[in-house]
Image (cartoon, helix red, strand yellow):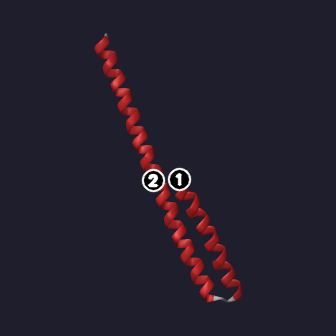
């Protein structure tokens, strides 16, 4: 899990709490700020997921290249 996913989830939860508290108290400014934090957190969380997917794809490609290289060496040794 990428650090951006964790930070994003924390911002999302903080924003959700702030927005909900604003709704309960009728504080529209707090509601708006909370909603903005929620949105920022969701974007950061999504960015972290994209980075994780990129890292996984890169690792998978490298593992596949290594596997093919081993097969080529084994074939040439035979």
Task: State the quadrant of the C terminus.
Answer: top left
Q: Residue at x 49, y 57 (%)?
A: 48
Image quadrant where residue 36 sits: bottom right
Please state the horizontal and vertical placement of residue 19, each as a whole percent of the image.
63, 79
Q: Between marks 2 and 1, how big is the CA–CA gap? A: 7 Å
- Quarter of the image for residue 25 reads bottom right
- Which residue is pictured at 66% across the width and 84% down the height? 23
Residue occupying image coordinates x 61% and y 88%: 28
Q: Secondary structure at mark 1?
A: loop
The image quadrant that residue 76 belongs to is: top left
* Label 2: how many Cα within 10 Å (few below 14, some 14–19, many 20+): some
Q: Residue furthest top?
A: 78
Is 68 placed above or below 48 here?
above
In the image: residue 74, left or right of residue 34? left
Q: Which residue is mark 1?
A: 2
Which x, y percent locates residue 65?
A: 35, 32
Q: Would residue 71 be found to the left or right of residue 44 on screen?
A: left
18 relative position to 2: left or right = right
Q: Residue at x 34, y 27 (%)?
A: 68
Relative to 21, is 6 on the left or the right? left
Work out whether mark 2 precedes mark 1 in sequence or the reverse, and give the earlier one: 1
Image coordinates of residue 57 in percent, x first then y, are 41, 44
| Disc 2 to disc 1: CB gap under 8 Å | yes
> x and y percent of residue 20 in the render?
67, 78
**Circle number at residue 51:** 2
């Amino acid at each position: 899990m990428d650090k951006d996913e964790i930070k994003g989830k924390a911002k999302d939860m903080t924003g959700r709490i702030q927005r909900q508290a604003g709704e309960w108290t009728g504080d529209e400014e707090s509601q708006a700020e909370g909603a903005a934090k929620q949105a920022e957190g969701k974007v950061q969380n999504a960015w972290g997921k994209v980075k994780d997917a990129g890292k996984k794809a890169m690792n998978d490609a490298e593992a596949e290249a290594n596997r093919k290289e081993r097969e080529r060496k084994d074939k040439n040794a035979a």
